[in-house]
Image (cartoon, rainbow, N blue to C red):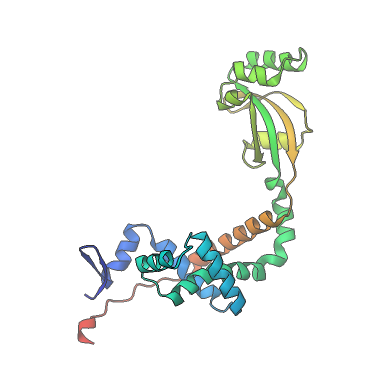
Amino acid sequence: MTPILQVGDRTIMTQEIVPMLKSYSLLPQFLQGVIIDQTIASVESTDEEIAIARQQFLEKNQLTTEEACHAWMNQRGLSPVQLDELALQDFKLLKYKVNTWGHQLESYFLQRKGQLDRVLYSLIRVQNPGLAQELYFRIQDDGQPFSEVAKDYSQGQEAQTGGLIGPVELNVPHPTLSRMLAISKPGQLWAPTQVGEWYVILRLEKFLAAQLDEAMRQRLLNEMFASWLQESLQKTPVHYLPERDYSRV
């Protein structure tokens, strides 16, 4: 067995690395890193991009002084060249995502928009159908404030906020509620509807349509990349090679 790493008083041998990665549930993360490195290896970067990537990496990790930078590298066993490679990884990965999926963003956004739209809504839920009907009429006919009724009667955590929930994306609420909210107009009050064990009174307060802004573009790129990476992990064969006796080399 060949020693490869010293951690305190313990010497880690080469043959122990894979079993340790498995026991710490780190092997999938390690394999992801290998696939990503192989994928972005061919992505070229200019000297200017390398400098920008390094500066951004140092700022992100609060390595504002040379002493802090050297201490950080020593702790991780990195050389300055390896630090630049690490700093450049995120930069190259973003470049790869844009080059690979950037032209699909608009169509993918339209596919996902129904789930990405957000809603602010008010909710009252009780388990007694008769009480639910009474509370509905108090709001609809008597003009009692929804928030007041919710605070007094709703049996979920929403009672603490006067029934108000959100803004949340449309795929967050129960599917029945999501369908109701998707076809609602702001201010529309729904009569009691059974959802599981609850009788729910629902009102849409505000509809917030998703926009394909820069933050959304980055989110969708990450989604498409994560889907591709998961598929790549499943397709990439991993073989455990027989141990080699380095003492005879």
Residue 64 in the image, given as x and y percentages of width and height: 49, 62
Q: Quadrant of the C terminus?
A: bottom left
Total number of numbered discs in the rendering: 0
Residue appearing at x 51%, y 69% in the figure: 87
Residue 152 in the image, given as x and y percentages of width and height: 60, 16
**Residue 24 quadrant:** bottom left
25 or 192, which is in the foreground? Answer: 25
Residue 181 in the image, given as x and y percentages of width and height: 72, 35
In the drawing, does residue 17 fall left or right of residue 60?
Answer: left
195 or 212, which is in the foreground? Answer: 212
In the drawing, does residue 2 fall left or right of residue 21?
Answer: left
Q: Is residue 44 visible?
A: no
Q: Quadrant of the N terminus?
A: bottom left
Residue appearing at x 50%, y 64% in the figure: 58
Residue appearing at x 77%, y 28% in the figure: 187
Residue 76 in the image, given as x and y percentages of width and height: 37, 67
- Is 197 drawn above or below residue 2 in the view shown? above
Residue appearing at x 39%, y 72% in the figure: 78
129 or 59, which is in the foreground? Answer: 59
**Residue 125 quadrant:** top right
Q: Is residue 113 visible?
A: yes
